[in-house]
Amino acid sequence: MKISLGPIVYFWPRQQVLDFYGRVAELPVDIVYLGETVCSKRRELGIDDWLELAGQLRAAGKQPVLSTLSLLEAGSELGVVRRLVGNGEYPVEANDLSAVEMAAAGPGFVAGPHFNTYNAATLELLASLGAIRWVMPVELSRDSLAAIQAQRPGDLETEVFAWGRLPLAFSARCFTARAADVPKDQCGFRCMDHPQGLPLATREGEGLFTINGIQVQSGRTASLIGMIPELQQLGVDVVRVSPQPTHTGDVVSLFRGVIDGRLAPAEAAGLAEPFAVGGACNGYWYGAAGMVAVS
Amino acid sequence: MELVCPAGSLPALKAAVDNGADAVYMGFRNATNARNFEGLNFDEKGARRGLAHAHAAGARVFTAINTYAAAGRWHEWTDAVDRAVDLGVDALILADPGLIAYAAADHPDMRLHLSVQASATTPEAIEFHRRRFGVRRAVLPRVLSLSQVRRVIAGTDAELEVFGFGSLCVMVEGRCALSSYVTGEAPNTAGVCSPAKAVRWVESARGRESRLGGVLIDLYRPDEPAGYPTLCKGRFAVDGQTYYALEEPTSLNVLDILPELQQAGVAAVKVEGRQRSPAYVAEATRVMRAALDQAAADPEGYVPDPALAARLDRLAEGRTHTLGALQRRWQ
């Protein structure tokens, strides 16, 4: 079983991103997804920067994948996807139907977590278009995964989002700009003030969601580290860790420890708990509310 | 532009048809449609009667099978497709790529529409389904500005349908799991958002609490009108302030820009609300019919009628309306 590092979904300063990937080169991850998936206005790094990082990570033995924007609205955004798809070196992670359409002619793509793959028929369609891997939508359960895996086309790999704030929704509206009471078009890049998003709580102080620009994430951190044996049994090829500003390396090491048989899953889950921002949850895995923590 | 109205029940279907809908959309009584609420939707007998009523009046009937087929329960969705075709409906509204492929292969003559739940926001996304599966029309998610709608129309040979009135989805349809995060059920998987069984109203010393899956969505003073608890329209605390952090309770209403939509080449305007009463559907249909006729008769001279807008506001969530993402300022 391989470990992937998802794209950085927050807006970090350029140097922080470069430093982060400098450390990733040393981490026991196999696949690294690169690029901006949330907001096209975030341009601390451009396509050429991402390609350069991809080159460095490949030299360090990692498999880079270039991720596309999740919600495409403007023509310029489609242009960026087209350039990414045509990069000629690395596969892309297609995060919407437009990117799948563009990537279908190419050398192979990953159907990302924001592409709605809910059943084996869709998986078959993706395979026929040249998909090499699919990422399970975060709201699907173990039972759904088992049913899909039972009919999975031969050489298609399966990846599961196994650690991080869950990407729950996207909107045309920027909720970070709304929180700052500024228009989206003059946002002043407020999301850079929130390196792990802006917490949204109920009026009782219960952490509920995390605001991240046009994205709404879970308040809790999804953790499937304790389910690694089940994921292996179900034939999952890749587990994804979503980057956070601190302790990403610690989390990856715990995943590695379980996969390599050096750590008991339950023990690793306990050790990972302090790194789970907002507390850990795993309800989706059991077909329950996503925010629930089933022990 | 065609007027497409919601039919959550046979009386609602009749209300829409009798008040001027060009087409109605309905679903079956199960998880295959995105308004899978208790007591709503159609069984086979009801669907037959609805079809007869609509067709006699010259209106078309679309069937929404627009959730994502659950793995392991694939046949529930293909059965729904087969059943709708057998009933003789005029179009299927689908979202699931695998199911679209199935419908196109098994029922090549059936007219297919891409549901809003398919989250297609670009010409490329729509063309994906048009070229491969012959999809004839796409319903646009409520995330594009008017200029972006124009650009999508220019880039595809499929017809475009936009939402004209009704509850406002703040998130991209088909890409929202807020409801399942809190309740375990969401539009993609179960065809429901904020399922009624997870809603609880609590009178406490603090006021009237609305809760979803135990989570406090809003707290109302005794004199404050309370709305159905949806996660995108609750009052929450962000950065030390309590406010409608995602969106206020409000409805989408495009009366102000009907000629622009018409000029852009929009083929159809849709009214949201299969969960609404027949009286609601009748009134929304009457108002939209009048406004559309006015815009069609004299696009240059069209002035939004304040009386019509006021009638829609009386039906609207929060009794107020917005152009939503169609207006850049909203975003």
Image (cartoon, coloured by chain):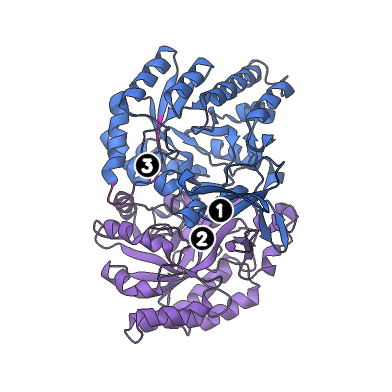
Chain colours: A purple, B blue
Label 3 is placed on what type of residue? Ala
- Please identify, in this view, whether the residue under mark 3 or under mark 2 is nearer the observer: 3
Residue A168, above or below B188:
below
What is the three-letter code of the residue carrying label 1?
A: Phe
Cβ atoms at labels 2 and 1 below 8 Å apart: yes
Q: In the orientation shown, which residue stands out farthest toward the top?
A: B56
Residue B143 figure quarter:
top right
Percent coordinates x, y for residue B16 in the rendering = 50, 21
Chain bearing tag 2 is: A
Query: Is A133 contained in the magenta span?
Result: no
Residue at position x 65%, y 68% in the image: A44
**Crowd band around label 3 with a 10 angstrom C-alpha radius: few (<14), some (14–19), many (20+):** many
Q: Which residues are magenta?
A: B63-73
Query: Residue A117 at what x, y percent from top left?
Result: 38, 53
Residue B261: quadrant of the picture: top right
Determine whether the residue tagged by mark 2 lies in a helix, strand or loop.
strand
Whether marks 1 and 3 lie on the same chain? no
Task: Return the residue at label 1.
Answer: A170
Instruction: Examine the rendering and report whether any part of residue A260 can be seen.
Output: yes
Tag shown at residue B206 = none
Please tell me whether the stretch drawn in magenta is mainly helix, strand or loop.
loop
- Is residue B43 left or right of A36 when viewed as pictured? left
Seen at 31% across and 68% down, the residue is: A236
Q: Chain of mark 3?
A: B
Say whether residue A60 is visible: no
Q: Which residue is mark 2?
A: A167
Mark 2 neighbour class, 10 Å CA radius: few under 14, some 14 to 19, many 20 or more: many
- In this rendering, the count of numbered labels is 3
Residue B195 position, x and y percent, is 47, 45
Residue A232: quadrant of the picture: bottom left
